[in-house]
Amino acid sequence: MKKVLFFLLTFLLLAVPALAYKYVVIETNYGDITVELDEERAPQTVANFLTYVDTNHYNGTIFHRVIKDFMIQGGNFSAEMVPKKTRAPIKNEATNGLKNLRGTIAMARTNVVDSATSQFFINLKDNGFLDHRDKSPRGYGYAVFGKVIKGMDVVDKIGVSQTHTFKRFRDVPVEPVVIHAIKRTEAE
């Protein structure tokens, strides 16, 4: 009986940390990026992101905004800069304590605090000015919900793409950086 109890407790202790994380692979024409999502600290944001993943929303979208030494942003536009229809905006979870450090993934939004839908960005460097500071619209911050665990070289390659103004959009890569798909995966 003690052995069974020991194995059960050991299993539970080992399983609990794994339950707090989910993983996705962002498949691009530049290579793959594996991301660990922090469901424990950003539950609504991760659920929202995975809904877009599971409905294939990201398939065929591009990283439409690339700013060297800052971030790469994608998740809603085609190569022709045509937006996809999105779900309702979600609550901003920037108060979760996660910081906008190099390699983290966060939700993009407008000047409205709770306006994030499908767009996300990956930080190319530590961007502390994007972290939550206070409850004002300027200080609320951008909700980090995971981090790159494999493929940061791909992120960096995308991050130095030559950009231009396309239609009314600035910082658009000249050569489209296509997100072929984002798929759930197991831990690396």
Image (cartoon, grey):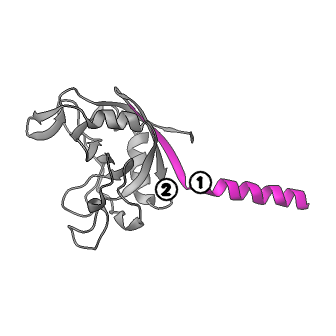
Q: Residues within 10 Å of mark 1 (few under 14, many from 20)?
A: few
Q: Which residue occupies 23% across, 41% down?
A: 68
Quadrant for residue 65, please give it. Answer: top left
Q: Which residues are magenta?
A: 1-27
Q: Is residue 167 left or right of residue 25?
A: left
Distance between the Cα atoms at labels 2 and 1?
8 Å
Q: Which residue occupies 20% across, 62% down?
A: 112
Q: Which residue is mark 1?
A: 19
Q: Is residue 51 left or right of residue 178?
A: right
Query: Answer yes or no: do the residues labelled 2 and 1 have beta carbons within 8 Å?
Result: yes
Q: Is residue 39 above or below residue 153?
A: below
Q: Which residue is mark 2?
A: 39
Quadrant the C terminus occupies: top right
Image location of residue 85, percent across then percent down: 25, 43
Image location of residue 110, percent across then percent down: 20, 56
Is 112 inside the magenta-drawn segment?
no
Amino acid of disc 1: Leu
Quadrant for residue 99, please give it. Answer: bottom left
Amino acid of disc 2: Glu
Camera-nearest residue between 55 and 29: 29
Q: Which residue occupies 71% across, 57% down?
A: 12
Is the magenta region chiefly helix, strand or loop?
helix
Q: Which residue occupies 86% across, 56% down?
A: 4
